Amino acid sequence: METNTSKRIAGLGPAWAVALLATGALAADSSPKTTPAEVAAWQEKGEAFFFVDTRPVTQFERKHARGAVSIPAFAVAAKPLPRGARIVVYDDGAGSSEAERAVAALRATGHSDLYLLEGGLTAWEAQGYPIVAPAGSSAVPFVETIGADELLKLIDDRTRVAIFDLSPAAAYKKGHVPGAISVPTPALLDQAVGRLQPADLIVLYDDGSGDVRQRAEALRRRGLRAVKYLPGGMPAWRAKKLREQG
């Protein structure tokens, strides 16, 4: 029997409409964005620019984009980057704000040829561009988490992201993350993600008592490369007193 949830998913229209929020630029951001493909092309052509990872050093050491240097956002204004140089900055890209803060700091110190990497490291990695990580066994998790605040920022920035609620349908009706689609069964989740592309950003969460990490890992294994999950699920969201639908 077809459920109300499956009818809702089927009625959302084109593939991009399934659990995807409208694409939009950051309201407060006046710096141009550049894509991973453009940056990779600049690297292949040998063009001169600084590729700056603004995340904490510990995250940079776990993995970073090929060619990037580590300058955390809080320290970027103190670094002697040449005036007039092209600078591309990135952070995790999934609700992070380090890159925006770095751009503001660099602009305040007189730099003008500044670019934000669209989608940050999440997009760079998901689109198959080279990642540098320590040799041998890696501490990098197969699927990474996203915090409630970072997820809300994705929503408020109108970033294109598919958000799926794995909670029972009754719990979803009582309240859910804005824009999330109810997929209480593996079959409904499979139906929904079947319309997505491998590099699409996906966030999963549940009611805090399920197997969301395992479900996220299963999506990674089937070729979806930008999957994250909200640890603690809806209880973690409510603990932050963030707005919800339902």
Image (tube, rainbow, N blue to C red):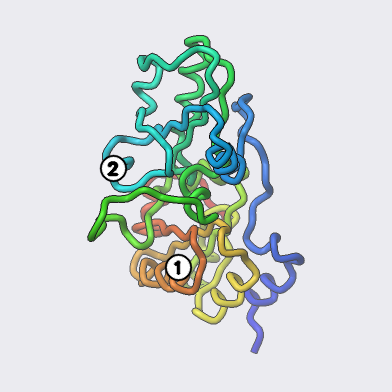
Query: On the image, which quarter does residue 228 sit in?
Result: bottom left
The mark found on residue 14 in the picture is none
Residue drawn 51% across the image and 48% down it = 124
Residue drawn 33% across the image and 68% down it = 209
Q: Residues within 10 Å of mark 1 (few under 14, many from 20)?
A: some
Counting from the top left corner in percent of width and height, residue 118 is at: 57, 41
The mark found on residue 220 in the picture is 1
- For the residue marked with disc 1, what is the amino acid? Arg
- For the residue marked with disc 2, what is the amino acid? Glu
Mark in the foreground, 2 or 1: 2
Residue drawn 26% across the image and 40% down it = 58
Report the side of 125 relative to 132 (left or right).
right
Q: How far apart in space, not on screen, are marks 2 and 1 (Cα)?
A: 23 Å
The mark found on residue 61 in the picture is 2
Q: Is residue 246 visible?
A: no
Considering every residue shown, the one lying at the far bottom of the view is 1
